Amino acid sequence: MKKANVLAIALVNAIGLATLGLGGSAGAISNCGSGHFCIWDGDNYTGGNAAALSVPVSSCRSIQTDPVFGYMDNITNSAANASGHTIYMFDSNNCSGAIGYSINDGQSIPSLGTFSNKMSSFMRADAYCNLHC
Ligand SMILES: [Ca+2]
C-alpha cells in the first residue's frame, strides 16, 4: 500500500498537470484522486505547478522540506480535498503556529484569498487536535 502510494505520487509528479487535469473549477474535485489532497499554484485549479499529495494519518506533512514537492512551498492558490478527512493548512513548516486555512473533505477552494502563496505544511484536523485541541 505504501509503495503504491509512493509510485502514484511519483507518476503524478512526472506527468504533472495532465494527471491532475485542468478542466476548470467544475473538475477540481473529480480530478483529485481519492485519498489525496490536491493543490495548484494558480487560482481556479490552474497554473504551471500542481501536486496530488498523500495525507499522513497522524503526522504533519511539510511541503517546504519535501524532496519531491518542495516546489509547491508558498505558491499554493487553490486546493481540492479528496482525502476523506478535514485538513488544516499552515504558513509555517511542521504545522506550527496558527491554522492558516481549513478545508473539508470533498471541498474545493478556487482561491485561498489571504492565505494564497503561504501554505508550507498540512495535517489531518483530527490528528492535529489529538495533539493540540
Ligand atoms: Ca509559508
Image (cartoon, grey):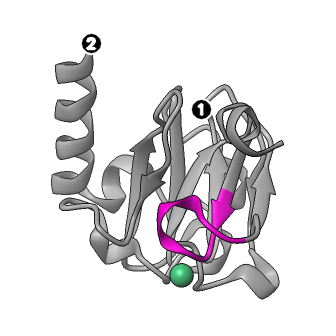
Instruction: Tell me which amino acid carries mark 2.
Output: Met
Height in image: 119 above or below 129? below
Q: Earlier in the sequence, mark 2 or mark 1?
A: 2
Quarter of the rendering containing residue 73 = bottom left
Q: Where's the C terminus, which quadrant?
A: top right
In depth, the one of 4 and 94 nearer the eye is 94
Quarter of the rendering containing residue 44 = bottom right
Q: Residue 99 placed where, x, y %?
A: 76, 64
Q: Where's the N terminus, which quadrant?
A: top left
Task: Tell me the residue at 67%/83% (across/down).
Answer: 116
Instruction: Tell me which amino acid carries mark 1.
Output: Ser
Task: Tell me the residue at 56%/55% (across/down).
Answer: 122
Q: Residue 95 placed where, x, y %?
A: 57, 60
Residue 100: which numbered mark, if any? Answer: none
Q: Residue 125 placed where, x, y %?
A: 73, 40
| Range of magenta residues | 89-97
Q: Residue 11 placed where, x, y %?
A: 18, 42
In depth, the one of 48 and 89 nearer the eye is 89
Q: Residues within 10 Å of mark 1 (few under 14, many from 20)?
A: many
Residue at disc 1, secondary structure: loop
Quarter of the rendering containing residue 91 = bottom right
Residue at disc 2, secondary structure: loop
Task: Tell me the residue at 35%/61% (across/down).
Answer: 17
Task: Tell me the residue at 76%/38% (across/down).
Answer: 129
Q: Which residue is mark 1?
A: 83
Q: Residues within 10 Å of mark 2 (few under 14, many from 20)?
A: few
Compared across the picture, whether 119 is left or right of 86 comes to left
- Residue 93 lies in magenta, yes or no? yes
Q: Which residue is mark 2?
A: 1
Height in image: 114 above or below 93? below
Rounded to the nearest angstrom, the CA distance separating label 2 from label 1 is: 15 Å
